[in-house]
Image: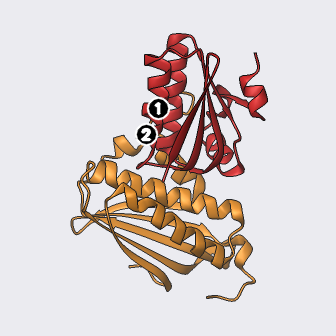
Amino acid sequence: MLQIAARHLEKITVFDVSGDIDLASSPELRKALLRELRELRMPRVVLNLKDVHYIDSSGVASLVEGLKASRDVGSRLVLFGLNSAVREVLQLSKLVKIFEITDSEEQAVAP
Amino acid sequence: MSQGSLLLKMELRSNPETLCVVRNALGELAQTLGFPEAECRAVVLAVDEALTNIIRHAYQGRTEQPIEASFRRIRVARDGAQKPALEIVLEDRGATVDREKLCGRKLEDVRPGGLGLHFIRESMDKVEFRRRWGRNQLRMVKLLHAAETRKEP
């Protein structure tokens, strides 16, 4: 079961994501990301992945769609809290370098 | 036909909601066999991606279609010796797999999709597709490097 809770800071939305991101749940993440980026035009969207213990290729695809949307509208998508399971999958995809990844929330929301 | 010691057999339906159940069971099995933590995650990822491909491509998103998964402990000739390994066979009765759809993509392309087969190949030591008797069969093998000295379950 995937859970996505949104917190709104000034011009930043932080999504606290928990659970597994797979074929069943990735559409929910994709929808949340695209709404915030394309419809609401938030200047920065931050994903807290601390409590995500599994991500598959459909989850990575959702992150890539979010990244593309952020580039299209001139905003930023920032990830933090990646545990080893999530980091391994991003490294396996060879896409880890294209994402903006920080070590902490403080860095992710810093001006 | 696969030989070896049958460890687990699952009769599944092509429902994405069941993927987490398979992941949990397989993670426990891989751990019991003695795979290191990172290799447990690799095996789980490969099977999850393979099931995702079956649901999306062979069954084109239709749920409630049959998938059989069997897990065996086998021995594989490698470097002049017989090495223990985990063999995973997935069978479905869906459409013939379009190899072009499953061939993956260039990793330098920054776009969603096309990663599943890449993940499977990177995670497993051997991956074979075949079509027989109206079924798609995917056979994957992972060598049990760290489990050779363990007692067989």
The answer to whether residue B120 is above or below residue B130 is: above
Q: Read off the chain for label 1.
A: A
What's the residue type where badge 2 is placed? Glu
The x, y position of residue B22, in whole percent, is 46, 66
Identify the residue position indicated by label 2 in the image.
Answer: A28
Alpha-carbon neighbours of circle 1 within 10 Å: few (<14), some, or many (≥20)?
some
The answer to whether residue A5 is above or below residue B83 is: above
At a point 72% along the width and 80% down the height, the residue shown is B148
Q: Read off the chain for label 2.
A: A
* Residue B129, quarter of picture: bottom left
- Which chain is painted in orange? B
Judge left or right: residue A37 versus residue A80.
left
The front one of B99 and A48 is: A48
At a point 42% along the width and 43% down the height, the residue shown is B103
The x, y position of residue B11, in whole percent, is 34, 74
Q: Are marks 1 and 2 in contact (CB under 8 Å)?
A: yes
Residue B112 visible in the picture? no
Residue B123 visible in the picture? yes
Identify the residue position indicated by label 1 in the image.
Answer: A32
The answer to whether residue B101 is above or below residue A13 is: below
The front one of A14 and B130 is: A14
- Which chain is painted in red? A
Judge left or right: residue A106 versus residue B30.
right
At a point 46% along the width and 83% down the height, the residue shown is B3
Instruction: Describe the element under mark 2 as helix, strand or loop.
Output: helix
Marks 1 and 2 sit apart, C-alpha to C-alpha, by 6 Å
What's the residue type where badge 1 is placed? Ala
Query: On the rendered image, what quadrant is the C terminus of chain A found in?
Result: top right
The x, y position of residue A29, in whole percent, is 48, 37
The x, y position of residue B72, in whole percent, is 50, 79
The verdict on a common chain for dots 1 and 2 is: yes
